Image (cartoon, rainbow, N blue to C red):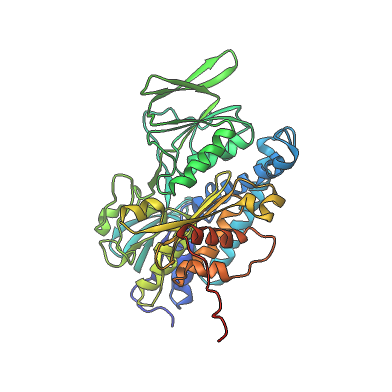
């Protein structure tokens, strides 16, 4: 097909090389378009690969392995694979995975003939941008028929908080820690805060989790969040919910440098370190959006329509910079679909079927509606549950506390939502996602044969549980012969 508008230097210019930007660029290149990705850092992959999704999930896996967490059901709470785990033990694995992911990203872009420009970008007009080289090589002006903003986010910083990267941290600073803290206060019980709180608690760190809301993860099914909270408290996490932070100060006591967190209620929390995790702000401040006729909200986010178009029709925005759900998986799909929409190609995507994976310990995954959403919408539903302890595989792997919950229409038995907490939840959820996608009923799980022993059997057990709650006997007896 080739370039379709020769008076522009590029058909599509993508700003940012994270998951959304990568998939947008590769999709556009596969449509035969001339595409460039602008990345202001010397490494590709954005926050997802370098300081966010990939490092935190790799760190989590290293913690699970070295702490012996998965075997404690068999060998006791004192069981550890390595008695004294250091940050160096954890980061060795993280650095290896990051290097591999950066290499894969670069290879994918290059083999699809996407030009990679290492520079910072800012608009000088609706279709024109100024690229400033990060290595001092100078400036370059470029034009593009379409522009895709995929600049992602950065941790929100309160100007009153004394961030020093050593005692008062944002999530990006975790990878620079010299040693594991004995005590840690996490401010903010969103996805990032809950993940790191549970990860450090598994290592034996005494964690206090503070949030002004009355529950963690408000978009997650309430019963699942309650289960997570129970597990975290069992792991000695102290929950300070319905509490807001009045101030943070750096102090010294006889045992060394500390942090004191003052709560509005008058309580004080002293810990070795504090992780400030109260949200993310879009990386839009340096883009000069107003020169393209755009503006961002107070958190740096850009508003888009269902096709990911901004108020300037030829400029699109995807990924974390447009807000919730801000997951790598959803960002990838947004980038792919937006690139198709931008050039008039058909694309199908169902945001209501995007699965969410939250890598706490234990992990959580969900797809479809929650009980709270169904109740608010006035939709009658019933619940079917299966606990891992009922399943042979749960006993084998030592996870006897996991839970899989199915929500379904009480009359038609059509599946409405799947909610899981436990080992492998983020993999297991895809079975339910597929059934939701084809409009399937609870009957599918009853009639399906699952490998034995597997956690997937939870679907069958939960389906029978749901049918039992309806007071039905599944199936009919054969008619007697005449």
Nearest the viewer among 475 and 275 is: 475
Residue 16 seen in the current view:
no
Residue 93 in the image: state x and y as whole percent: 67, 47
Q: Residue at x 29, y 44 (%)?
A: 298
The picture places residue 431, in percent across and down from the top left corner, at 55, 65
Q: Quadrant of the N terminus?
A: bottom left
Displayed quadrant of residue 233:
top right
234 w.r.t. 439: above or below: above
Q: Residue most toward the front? A: 482
Whether residue 295 is situated above or below residue 448 in the rendered picture: above
Residue 202's image quarter?
A: top right
Residue 212 vs residue 77, the one in the foreground: 77
Q: Residue at x 27, y 67 (%)?
A: 313
Where residue 475 sits in the image (x, y, percent)? 53, 72
Q: Which quadrant, please, contains the C terminus? A: bottom right
Residue 15 showing in the rendered view: yes
């Amino acid at each position: 097909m080739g370039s379709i508008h020769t008076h522009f230097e590029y058909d599509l210019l993508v700003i940012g090389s994270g998951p959304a930007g990568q998939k947008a660029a590769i999709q556009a290149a596969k449509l035969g378009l001339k595409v460039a990705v602008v990345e202001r850092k010397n490494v590709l992959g954005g926050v997802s690969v370098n300081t966010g999704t990939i490092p935190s999930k790799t760190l989590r896996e290293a913690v699970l392995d070295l702490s012996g967490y998965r075997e404690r059901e068999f060998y006791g709470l004192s069981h550890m694979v390595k008695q004294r785990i250091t940050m160096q033990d954890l980061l060795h694995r993280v650095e290896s995975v990051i290097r591999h992911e950066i290499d894969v990203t670069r290879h994918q872009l290059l083999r699809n003939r996407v030009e990679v420009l290492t520079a910072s970008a800012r608009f000088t007009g609706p279709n024109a941008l100024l690229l400033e080289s990060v290595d001092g090589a100078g400036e370059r002006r470029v034009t593009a028929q379409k522009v895709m903003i995929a600049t992602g986010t950065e941790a929100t910083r309160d100007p009153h908080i004394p961030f020093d990267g050593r005692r008062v941290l944002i999530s990006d600073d975790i990878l620079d820690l010299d040693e594991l803290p004995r005590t840690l206060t996490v401010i903010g019980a969103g996805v990032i805060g809950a993940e790191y709180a549970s990860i450090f608690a598994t290592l034996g760190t005494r964690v206090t989790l503070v949030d002004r809301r009355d529950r963690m993860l408000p978009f997650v099914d309430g019963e699942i969040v309650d289960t997570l909270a129970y597990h975290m408290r069992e792991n000695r996490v102290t929950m300070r919910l319905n509490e807001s932070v009045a101030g943070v100060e750096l102090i010294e006591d006889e045992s060394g440098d500390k942090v004191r967190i003052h709560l509005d209620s008058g309580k004080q929390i002293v810990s070795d370190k504090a992780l400030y995790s109260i949200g993310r702000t879009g990386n839009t401040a340096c883009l000069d959006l107003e020169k393209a006729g755009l503006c961002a909200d107070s958190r740096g986010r850009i508003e888009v329509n269902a096709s990911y178009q901004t108020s300037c029709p030829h400029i699109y925005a995807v990924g974390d910079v447009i807000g919730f759900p801000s997951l790598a998986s959803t960002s990838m799909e947004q980038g792919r679909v937006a690139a198709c929409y931008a050039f008039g190609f058909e694309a199908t995507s169902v945001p209501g079927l995007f699965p969410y994976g939250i890598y706490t310990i234990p992990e959580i995954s969900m797809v479809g509606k929650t009980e709270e959403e169904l109740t608010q919408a006035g939709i009658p539903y019933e619940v079917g549950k299966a606990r891992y302890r009922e399943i042979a595989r749960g006993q084998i792997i030592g996870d006897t506390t996991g839970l899989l919950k199915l929500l379904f229409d009480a009359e038609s038995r059509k599946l409405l939502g799947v909610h899981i907490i436990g080992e492998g939840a983020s993999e297991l959820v895809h079975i339910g996602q597929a059934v939701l996608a084809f409009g399937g009923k609870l009957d599918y799980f009853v009639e399906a044969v699952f490998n034995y022993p597997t956690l997937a059997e939870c679907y069958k057990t939960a389906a029978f549980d749901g049918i039992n709650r309806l007071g039905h006997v599944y199936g009919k007896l054969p008619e007697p012969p005449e």
